[in-house]
Amino acid sequence: SSVLVINGPNLNLLGQRQPDVYGQATLADVEALCVARADTLGLEIAFIQSNHEGAMIDAIHAARGVHGGLVINAGAYTHTSIALMDAVASVELPMVEVHLSNIHARETFRHVSYLSRVALGQICGFGPQGYVMALDALATRLLPE
Ligand code: DQA
């Protein structure tokens, strides 16, 4: 089975961007962690990033019939995008929501996630390790026991 990991706006700057909040690891480092875990789990994986809401929606639509599940860190679109939420609902793929930071410990505008309504669950506050946890969670859904 295959998982698509989608990263949203500003996550291309991971490692340089507010390292006090998001850490030193780059998105390439996060991808390497995901590839290694997917390998161990026996999952196929694809890893993408876009700063554009519409491109993320297109990627979610294209995942239908290709991937068995989604991991999404939608960045700030998490808190604003009904369209992304609707896209996930439309493809009916199991999705785990990830955030590097603990969004519930930050500004109140980050406490609300539209994506959570269509997620199996949300993992936040564990940095890059959260992506690995999300793959583990999806693997229990997608792989035979
Ligand atoms: C984030 C949290 C969001 O609130 C923020 O807009 C991001 C990153 C995280 O991974 O902690 O861009 O999704």
Image (tube, grey):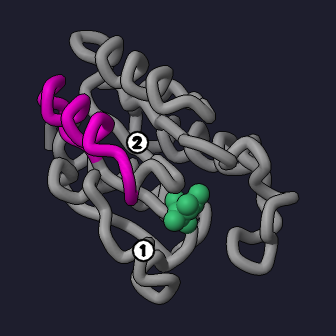
Residue 27 falls inside the magenta stretch = no
Q: How many numbered callouts?
A: 2
What amino acid is at disc 1?
Phe
Mark 2 Cα within 10 Å, few/some/many (few <14, many 20+)? some
Q: What element carries label 1?
A: helix
Q: Residue 41 carries which label?
A: 2
User: Which quarter of the image is occupied by the N terminus?
Assistant: top left
Q: Choose top left, top right, bottom left or bottom right for residue 86.
A: top left
Residue 63 appears in the picture as rendered? yes
Q: How far apart are marks 2 and 1 (CA)?
A: 35 Å
Q: Name the residue under label 1.
A: 109
Q: Which residue lies furthest to the bottom in this view?
A: 105
Q: In this view, does 79 lie above or below 52?
A: below
- Point out residue 97 in the picture as x, y percentages from the top left corner: 35, 54
Q: Nearer the viewer, mark 2 or mark 1?
A: 1
Identified at 43% across, 72% down, the residue is 110
Q: Quadrant of ligand 1?
A: bottom right
Residue 84 falls inside the magenta stretch = yes
Is residue 32 rendered to the left or right of residue 97?
A: right
Identified at 72% across, 46% down, the residue is 27
Identified at 22% across, 11% down, the residue is 65
Which segment is the magenta one?
79-95
